[in-house]
Amino acid sequence: MKQRLCTGLISPSDYLISLLDSIGIWYEEIDFKKDLTKNYSVIILEKVSLNSNQQTKINDFLRNNGSLLEISTKPYFYSDELTTSYSKTIFNTNSESGFNRVGPIDIYSHWTSAKNSTLFSGLVDFQKTENSSYQNVCFLGLDVHSLPKATSYSRKRFYSPSGLFPDEIVNKVSRDSLSDLIELCIKKLLYARNLPFIKKWTSPKPEPVFGFRVDSDYGSKKSLDSIYNLLSDFGIKATWFLHVQAHENYLEHLKTFGEQELALHGYNHGYSGSIAKIQENIRTGLSVLASSGIHPSGFCAPYGIWNFGLQKVLSEFNFNYTSEFTSGYDGVPFVVPKSTNLQIPIHPICTGSMNRKGYSSDQMEEYFLSVYEQKKSSHKPIFFYHHPMQKGLDVFGEIFKKVLADGLTNLTFNEYASFWKKRQDQQISIYSEEQKIFIESNDPELYLYISNTIDEFDLVSTNTQVLEKSAYSTFKYDTPSLPSNSEIEQIHQNRFQLYKTNILDWRNRQRL
């Protein structure tokens, strides 16, 4: 039988769609008039109501070797004793291959744990249905549509080998880890059926993407030149988010920065929830930049704060992307649910965060290299940022050396956004029959990721039409040196200090 390697969805939430688009799998909403077994390799079911006919068809699908991922606190088909509780963070208590690459997940939400599972404290479990020879049902005890939204953020600490934990306000949900977990669940279900996992690759080249962002803020001409000189020494392209008012007298000079992207950080460096004030700040910034022949393709809000006012205002402008770590941090680009805004996440810790903790230059370098290696071991994009008036610029020289030595794909934010939109528009159809994989795509220039084991994968051009089933092992995952649960618990201690930092940060924040 010719098997479509398509994931079937039933009334998916906007949040789930955003996650699956970032992962890059082929999915569609289920048509119950079709033969489910032939048309869907995996079905994902959230917390939705099923009528008796739909329940019967899914039971038949499972009896015919189909696989089901239930993402819900009240599953239909998974059966075990369940406990519901509220947690800010769920810890990984299992060292199973693949899952040991996923760190703790911040959810700030209610969740359900399975009594007999040790995967993520019972958040995840696999079981067989009657007459199945393998585990064909996966339970993930979250209601993703109820998770905190893109506008919900909290101050979090980030692990550091030095034992000094820098902090920043970021989105409450560890979106990147949650995405990894969903992908691993789908992989394990497919592998049990001897089917490959295939998704769109996250880079225009086989090598992962590296990006560098400069938030110019109140930087002097001299400090901006210092950053540009370092970038030029290594041939690194970066994206400069300009605080326009601070550089109004030498915008022509910034245009001489070769191979760099100039984007908008606002005319004033200030925060507001007011639609009118945000509009004025963006419009004025664009107008002043345009008078110097600068036409930015991207925007990032001062202080990295995403709110409903900003989401509304950005729909009026023609930016290709935006980048606010309170909507999502680390990981791959994503479209904010219920919007059209493409977010390019970054690692949210800068040298300023470390300066406040008393870091030495060596400790800063150690921190960034640790984050770099963790991401590289998982073949993920790496995005760092810097402010010109902060100490620690020199530590990025070592990072840039690594980028060149490892041959990463250095892109500006707009280049990555353009690629990502091309990726979003890519339509793929994938079929399995006997020992062959058949691929159809409307874009022959991109790559697909294909794997049939947890620790290895291959990349194939979408120009490839037929693949022999084999061991896809060109690329391998290294096991990253993630912090232990005891170290993570240290990060979550003494939250009173974080509250104090929040108050000081709020008082010092400029208002529009």
Image (tube, grey):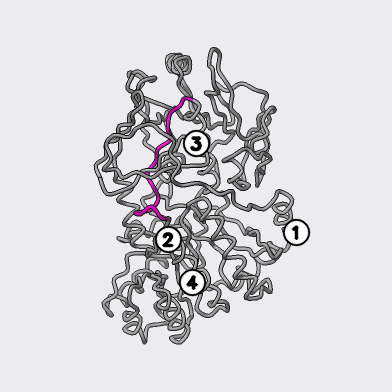
- Point out residue 512 in the picture as x, y percentages from the top left corner: 47, 72
Magenta span contains residue 354: no
Q: Any mark on residue 453, and which? A: 3
Q: Which residue is mark 1?
A: 494
Task: Using residue 377 as the reference point, say whether residue 53 is left or right of it.
Answer: left
Amino acid type at image mark 3: Thr
Task: Using residue 423 as the reference point, say whether residue 143 is left or right of it.
Answer: right
Circle 3 residues within 10 Å: few <14, some 14–19, many ≥20: some
Identify which residue is drawn at 41% across, 39% down. Answer: 450
Which is the main secondary structure of the residues drawn in magenta?
loop
Amino acid type at image mark 4: Gly
Is 408 located above or below residue 114 in the figure?
Answer: below
Magenta span contains residue 194: yes
Is 105 located above or below residue 58 in the figure?
Answer: below
Instruction: Give the CA distance from mark 3 to mark 1.
Output: 41 Å
Q: Which residue is mark 2?
A: 408
Q: Which residue is mark 4?
A: 270
Circle 1 residues within 10 Å: few <14, some 14–19, many ≥20: few
Instruction: Give the CA distance from mark 4 to mark 1.
Output: 30 Å
Which contiguous range is marked in magenta?
A: 193-207
